[in-house]
Image: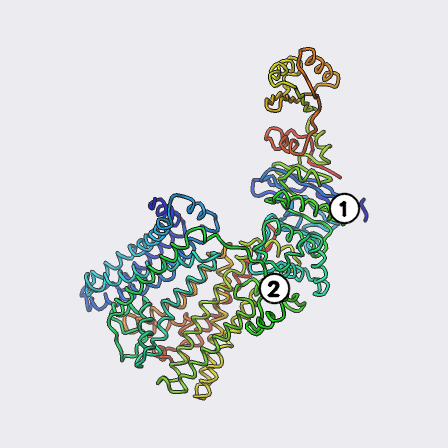
């Protein structure tokens, strides 16, 4: 019975053409990586050194692939079955929740296993170059990657079991994985070196990240470390935390696989206007902008599609935007405050670098979820033909949709400005740097929006549109950083600089002179790159919209 | 209202997708204030015809005009003249019914104050006022269909084109939808409705068109269509004893033409037959049954209904031999 689910789940994915292309592409990348670094002279000079460099890059690449590609499978798994109605059939069969869950989990793990197996020949080639141990680096790296697959599959399935929409599940899963893999490193970076309970918690929190676990195994410096500290046992802690998270997520999912997953009453559409005065006053005080208040009509001077987009988004309503902006502003000010108050012995450029990281992470996390489904959601929900029968033009509709994303991103960027203002106040000499950083961030936001919208417009369903946008954007943001990670070896300064020009994260970091980026001159090359890609994406978006708009 | 001027004129409308002909030389005229039912099996070309009328598809040849506006040349005018409800509701998440209608009202450029009043009016007309604060995605299918009709009325169009409005509705909701469509016709709207629920259509439509394989096979009132189908009539004889059914069938076979279809129903103690026999022939047939000792309590003609007409045209061998030449006028 378990095999039946495993078979079905695995064959459904593996027989798609997209998956075949992906596997072939992955093999090609791995082969290329090894071929480029394979010694061509007769003497194998420092072969072991080179092998380690290649293997390091290869491992980070493999981890990035796992983080980008794998989550989409568990994230969509249960919620898609729920939407299609096949989950009800499964729950009505003699299969219990255990079998259903483990059938699904093992099928995703089998897929991850295939991805890892595809990398084996390249890993074997690295081993043949020498300098790698069959009992040390190789098994440890693969063990960490296997744990990543296990943990994120369990987390994805849990989120999927709690979600009501496929694209919502994807967004939330990628958000959680970004938090687990990257954001979890932040507190440790800020608090390392201090002697407090918080620092200990931050150290443990850092161990949730597979990046932190992989670096010591590959002989790299401690992630976020400043050359002063090196903590042993991060991979061990990562293994422990992964297993704990997997067990908890699995229990949560299994407990959800019963009638309760369908047991949802329809929202009755409660309205504050119909409640008594006391309730109205309390809600006004608590929410500032009460989401349950009856909204007014759309004004003549605004684009109705923009208002519709805001109203349709779960977090598009004003009270949510206010919360988001408030959190961003508070975070930005807190970081500026800890610098000025001397709590941490950091330079302005360091705190600036951290702010840039966080802002880009925020932009990368939020923008595809807002922009990727602009057209696909309409096509999927059946709203597109309705819009076509209104007197609005296709361009006005697209502009209204883009405006709703632009305004949200402007709000987010403005919310973080107070931190930069404090930085300029502390060190007035940084004024021009900060100005250029803000331009970089605005360009990144525009780039992320147009790229996501352009890629998303190529799809007819929201879920693949969102995944494609996330994957592309994260690949552009994280890919060049992998090359940067090998900046001393195997890549030279010029190669790294050329690659970093394509990176929206590196440009503002180089402007603010963050550690590791101070020697690269990425402006205005980066602006040109982002401008050209944005223009191309805009063209794709307009072309696709016009094509879909025209009567067939 | 000028009832002489046709509201809808379709002339030789053809739509081809490569070698496949989805719509073949459709010609049709409708007067104002009528409810026209377009029926046909899945893939017959109903939705293609509708999409051309609302400007979502382009015809390969032929023309279609609504209130004088060409569906291809005057696409912008058509949008204001037609209210279109597709077979899919087109839901938006996290949007309340009033906000949903407000958005489409704004999309049609209705000024805010007028829009508020208009939304109240159409909610009253369509019986959706009680669900104004509900989220559209949480509405039942019947409720969504009503909201869909409300949306089509926002800009006060002359013609309403409704694709399967009664699909998936329970009997109560179906009756409510039927009453709603009748009340809209009373308001002077011209309605073009497609449906698979034929009894519903037969109750509300002043004209019906049957379309199969992209061709209009029959057009007119249900009675007119019944006459178009065949000269053969269906007669039912009700007996007192089921045991006499085979005896009655033997008499019928001996008397009627060889092509006559005879069906015995033991539970109903009835025998039905389709025949081209004359009135005199029917009289002598009844006499033969009585003389043969068959106890007949009723002997009557069964009226052709829409379902029967539809089935006649939906049969592959029948449709090509159908009577309507593809042109119809009402």
Q: Residue at x 71, y 16 (%)?
A: B286
Q: Which residue is mark 2?
A: A271
Drawn side of residue B205 relative to residue A276, left or right: right
Residue A308 sits above or below residue B282 on the image: below
- Badge number at residue B32: 1
Q: Residue at x 62, y 15 (%)?
A: B244
Tell me residue A12's x, y (percent): 39, 47
Q: Residues within 10 Å of mark 2 (few under 14, many from 20)?
A: some
Q: Residue at x 46, y 80 (%)?
A: A436
Camera-side residue: B6 or A144? A144
Residue B243 sits above or below residue B85 on the image: above
Camera-side residue: A176 or A40? A176
Chain at tag 2: A
Mark 2 or 1: in front is 2
**Where, quadrant-wise, is the C terminus of chain B in this rendering?**
top right
Badge 2 element: loop
Chain at tag 1: B
Residue A70 sits above or below residue A324 on the image: above
């Amino acid at each position: 019975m378990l095999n039946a689910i495993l078979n079905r789940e695995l064959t459904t994915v593996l027989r798609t053409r997209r998956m075949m292309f992906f596997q072939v592409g992955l093999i090609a990348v791995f082969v290329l990586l090894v071929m480029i670094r394979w010694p061509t002279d007769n003497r194998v000079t420092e072969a072991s050194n080179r092998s380690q460099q290649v293997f390091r890059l290869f491992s980070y690449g493999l981890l990035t692939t796992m983080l980008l590609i794998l989550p989409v499978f568990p994230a969509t798994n249960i919620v898609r079955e729920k939407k299609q109605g096949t989950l009800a059939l499964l729950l009505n069969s003699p299969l219990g929740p255990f079998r259903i869950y483990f059938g699904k989990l093992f099928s995703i793990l089998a897929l991850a296993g295939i991805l890892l197996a595809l990398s084996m020949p390249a890993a074997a080639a690295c081993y043949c170059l020498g300098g790698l141990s069959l009992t040390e680096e190789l098994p440890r790296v693969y063990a960490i990657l296997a744990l990543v697959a296990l943990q994120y599959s369990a987390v994805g399935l849990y989120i999927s079991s709690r979600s009501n929409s496929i694209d919502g599940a994807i967004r939330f899963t990628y958000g959680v994985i970004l938090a687990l893999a990257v954001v979890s490193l932040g507190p440790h970076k800020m608090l390392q070196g201090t002697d407090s309970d918080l620092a200990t918690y931050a150290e443990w929190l850092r161990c949730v990240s597979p990046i932190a676990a992989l670096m010591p195994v590959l002989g790299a410096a401690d992630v976020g470390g400043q050359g002063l500290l090196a903590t042993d046992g991060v991979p061990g802690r990562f293994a422990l935390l992964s297993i704990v998270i997997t067990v908890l997520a699995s229990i949560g999912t299994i407990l959800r696989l019963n009638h309760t997953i369908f047991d949802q009453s329809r929202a009755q559409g409660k309205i504050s206007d119909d409640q008594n005065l006391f309730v109205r006053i309390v809600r006004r005080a608590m929410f500032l902008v009460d989401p349950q208040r009856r909204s007014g009509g759309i004004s003549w001077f605004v684009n109705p599609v923009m208002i519709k987009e805001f109203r349709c988004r779960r977090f598009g309503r004003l009270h949510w935007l206010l919360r988001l902006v408030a959190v961003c502003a508070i975070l930005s000010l807190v970081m500026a405050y800890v610098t000025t108050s001397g709590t941490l012995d950091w330079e302005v450029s360091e705190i600036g670098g951290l702010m840039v990281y966080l802002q880009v992470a925020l932009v990368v996390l939020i923008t595809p979820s807002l922009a990727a489904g602009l057209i696909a959601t309409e096509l999927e929900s059946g709203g597109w033909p309705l819009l076509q029968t209104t007197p609005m033009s296709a361009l006005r509709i697209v502009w209204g949709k883009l405006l709703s994303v632009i305004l949200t991103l402007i709000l987010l960027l403005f919310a973080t400005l107070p931190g930069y203002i404090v930085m300029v106040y502390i060190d007035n000499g940084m004024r021009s740097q900060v100005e250029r950083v803000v331009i970089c961030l605005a360009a990144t936001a525009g780039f992320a929006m147009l790229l996501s919208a352009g890629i998303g417009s190529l799809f007819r369903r929201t879920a693949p549109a969102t995944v494609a946008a996330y994957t592309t954007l994260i690949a552009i943001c994280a890919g060049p950083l992998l090359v940067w990670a090998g900046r001393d070896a195997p890549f030279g300064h010029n190669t790294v600089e050329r690659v970093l020009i394509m990176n929206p994260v590196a440009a503002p970091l180089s402007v603010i002179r963050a550690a590791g980026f101070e020697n690269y001159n990425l402006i205005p090359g980066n602006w040109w790159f982002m401008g050209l890609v944005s223009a191309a994406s805009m063209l794709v978006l307009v072309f696709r919209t016009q094509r879909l708009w025209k009567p067939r | 209202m000028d009832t002489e001027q046709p509201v809808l004129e379709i002339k030789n409308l053809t739509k081809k997708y490569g070698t496949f002909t989805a719509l073949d030389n459709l010609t049709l005229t409708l007067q104002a204030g009528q409810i026209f039912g377009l029926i046909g099996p899945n893939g017959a070309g109903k939705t293609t015809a509708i999409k051309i009328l609302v400007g979502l598809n382009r015809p390969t040849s032929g023309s279609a005009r609504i209130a004088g506006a060409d569906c291809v040349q005057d696409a912008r005018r058509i949008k204001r003249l037609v209210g279109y409800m597709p077979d899919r509701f087109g839901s938006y998440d996290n949007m309340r019914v009033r906000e949903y209608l407000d958005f489409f009202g704004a999309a049609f450029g209705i000024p805010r104050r007028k829009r508020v009043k208009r939304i109240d009016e159409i909610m009253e007309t369509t019986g959706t006022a009680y669900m104004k604060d509900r989220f559209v995605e949480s509405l039942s299918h019947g409720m969504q269909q009503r909201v869909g009709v409300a949306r089509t009325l926002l800009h006060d169009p002359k013609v309403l084109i409704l694709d399967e409005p009664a699909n998936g509705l329970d009997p109560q909701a179906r009756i409510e939808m039927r009453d709603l469509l009748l009340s809209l016709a009373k308001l002077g709207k011209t309605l073009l409705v497609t449906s698979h629920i034929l009894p519903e259509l037969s109750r509300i439509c002043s004209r019906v068109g049957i379309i199969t394989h992209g061709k209009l096979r029959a057009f007119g009132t249900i009675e007119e269509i019944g006459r178009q189908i065949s000269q053969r009539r269906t007669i039912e004889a009700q007996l007192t004893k089921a045991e006499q059914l085979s005896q009655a069938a033997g008499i019928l076979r001996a008397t009627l033409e060889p092509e006559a279809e005879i069906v015995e129903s033991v539970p109903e103690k009835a025998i039905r037959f389709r025949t081209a026999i004359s009135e005199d022939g029917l009289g002598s047939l009844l006499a033969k049954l009585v003389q043969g000792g068959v106890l007949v309590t009723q002997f009557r003609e069964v009226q052709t209904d829409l379902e029967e007409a539809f089935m006649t045209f939906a049969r592959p061998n029948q449709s090509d031999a159908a009577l309507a030449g593809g042109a119809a006028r009402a």
